[in-house]
Structure formats: C-alpha cells, structure tokens
Image: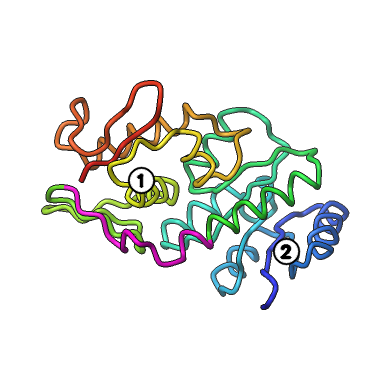
Amino acid sequence: MSAERLLVVEDEPNLANVISDNLELEGFEVEIVGDGLRALERIREGGTSLVLLDVMLPGLDGFSICERLRAEENQVPILFLTAKSEKDDRVRGLQAGGDDFLTKPFDLRELILRVRAILRRTQWYEAPSEAGDELVLGDMRVDFKSFTVHAPDREIRLSSKETMILRYLSERVGEVVPRADILDRVWGYDAFPTTRTIDNFIVRLRRVLEPDARSPRFIHTVRGSGYRLTP
C-alpha cells in the first residue's frame, strides 16, 4: 500500500524541514511549499492526502487558500498551523473549511496524532456507508458526496464538518448519539473544539434542514445525552 502524500505549506525553512523529517519517519511522503500562491496551484493539481497549512504566508494567506479551495468544491483535508492563538482565528479557520487547528509552538507528537486522526476520519467518510450516499429529510435531499442539500427551490452547500455530522447520525438513525461520539468520529480528539461546538453545528443544520428550527422534526436534542436523527 502506497504512503499517504502530505503537503507542508510553511515559509520558515527550518520548521518546514523538522515537520517533514518527522512525518517521513512515520512513513508519509512529504512535499514542502513555502509560498501561498504556489501552494494553491500545487493543491489544485491533486494527489495530496492532507495539507498542513501555515496561516501567515507570502503571496496568499492560509485562510484565503482554504476559502478558495472550498469555493471550488475541493475538500482536501487541511490542518492549520499558526502562531496565532486567538479564539477568533481558530473559529475563522474552521469556518473557512479547515479540519483542524494547531498553534505554534506545538509538540511534534501531537501534530502526528492529529494528522493520523484527520486521515482516519477521511478514510471513514470516503468508504461506502451502510446508510447510503444520500439522506432524505422531508422534501430535502442531502448528498454526502457533493456536500449539498437539494431543496425544491434551491441548493445549499454544507461544510465538510456539517456533512460528516449528518452522515454519522444517519449511520445510527433512531439512536441517541452522545456528543462525545460525534466529536470522536468527526474531529477525532477532544481538546478543541468542545462539545459546545457540536451544538453550534447542529443549530446551523437545523436552520438549513428543518421546517421550523425551533421545533425540530428530524434532528432531536436528548437533554444531557446527545442527538437523535429521525428521518
């Protein structure tokens, strides 16, 4: 089986080489790019399993790279690496479509754990699901492959995290799914985001999918436990 191919987008050569060396020791194939515009071109070429993306880059910043890729429906997994630790930057990174966020300086063991967690959930999402590729909720149809909700009068794009949450709930339809289970499956760790973040994603999904978000028909909260999907 061929090694996963990772792209490290980092303009500080010493740090980029340290990250690359450690990932290669773990069996990954690694390529380094130090410029934002070149990184965007390289990602568009395909063949990358995961991008480790610095935020502050010459040419084009990491947030803008991620936003452009998601607008093009490119769902390559992205792990942001940044010296910024403000909560707003973390939120912006996730809203831009990033999969994870790691603040410098970081422990290389934690970096590797997060890389593996992202790749595991990507493999889960790309594998065939017993629940199928679509979820029908009333007159709405959710396409898990295209991250799109098809409504009678419009189409709505979902983020990768929103779609993953829906797919996981659909695989356990009718069950009460604890928030911790959703966090583990969709994010793969419990440091950040918190279970409260899941609640915020559910609020967004209800606004898109429910006839009345204040009185849900499909995505039910089980107080003190989690969520239950009832198509």
Look at 20% across and 46% down and name the residue there: 231
Dividing the image into 4 quarters, which one contains the N terminus? bottom right
Residue located farthest toward the top when viewing the structure as drawn: 224
Q: x, y (%) of residue 153?
A: 12, 52
Estimate how packed mark 2 is, as few (under 14), some (14 to 19) or many (20 or more) residues with alpha carbons within 10 Å. Answer: some
92 vs 159, left or right, is right
Residue 83 image offset from top left, x and y in percent: 73, 37
Of the two numbered discs 1 and 2 in the rendering, the one whose residue sits closer to the viewer? 1
- Residue 33: which numbered mark, if any? 2
Separation of marks 1 and 2 at Cα, in angstroms: 37 Å
Residue 56 in the image: above or below residue 223 = below
Single out the residue that lies furthest toward the bottom.
1
Query: Which region of the structure is painted magenta?
Result: 123-137
Task: Say whether marks 1 and 2 touch (CB < 8 Å).
Answer: no
Residue 218 location in percent, x, y? 22, 39
Q: Which residue is mark 1?
A: 169
| Quadrant of the rendered image containing residue 227 | top left
The residue at 45%/33% (across/down) is 179
